[in-house]
Amino acid sequence: MQPRSLEQLLRQLQQDPRWQQDRTLRQIQQRWSGLVGPAIAAQAEPVAIQRQTLQVAVSSGAWAQTLSFERLRLLQRLRQELKIKPQEIKDIRFSTAYRDRRTVTAPLESDRQQQSWQAHPCRLGETLNPAIASDPLQRRRDLSRRLPRCPRCGIPTPPGELQRWRCCALCIRQQWSSPTG
């Protein structure tokens, strides 16, 4: 038996379906953020191709469900932009079960998201008394006392809602759903 050249071995290896899948997965991982956008890329990461299905790790069940609704659009985009053949990847599955194999961040863990949440208009800048903070019912009462009132119905309303709609969410919903709206 005559030894094969390195070029022949590499050509044979590249023809192997498993090698093709690995190459396709690496190609998807490299371009993932550009394909789905930075917001989705922060919460979801492709981790494997199994049985012609791209397995994507997500940070939460809510992300899995949301992205499942978009899976056909994402699959079409993958095929178009990366020139992936339909027989290579037939579907996409989003799951939290792959979290141990991923590096995506959990919701609100990034500094930018945390700062954004702290700066949201509905948040109160004051800190709570530790004794009140431990009792959920007392905490809710304390927050209700400090919130401004809706001018229409008089219930405690987050400042962000008043700033945005000049009334609480319940009143604006009622206004929008009324026939004269």
Image: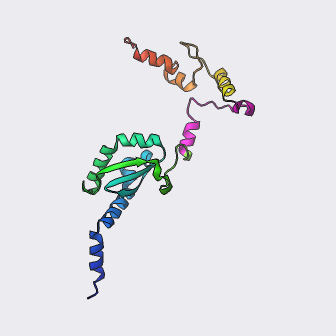
**Region rendered in magenta:** 112-135
> What colouring style does the render use?
rainbow
Q: How many marks?
A: 0
Where is residue 90 shown, x and y percent of the image?
A: 28, 52
Residue closest to the eye, 20 or 181: 20
- Please tell me which residue is depicted at 43% across the width and 48% down the height of the picture: 95
> In the picture, which quadrant includes the C terminus?
top left
The image quadrant that residue 85 belongs to is bottom left
User: Does residue 162 sit above or below 134 in this rendering?
Assistant: above
The image quadrant that residue 123 belongs to is top right
The answer to if 29 sits in the magenta stretch is no
User: Does residue 69 sit above or below 147 in this rendering?
Assistant: below
Where is residue 116 shown, x and y percent of the image?
A: 54, 39
- Please tell me which residue is depicted at 38% across the width and 11% down the height of the picture: 180
Q: Left or right: where does residue 60 sit relative to residue 21?
A: right
Where is residue 102 shown, x and y percent of the image?
A: 48, 55
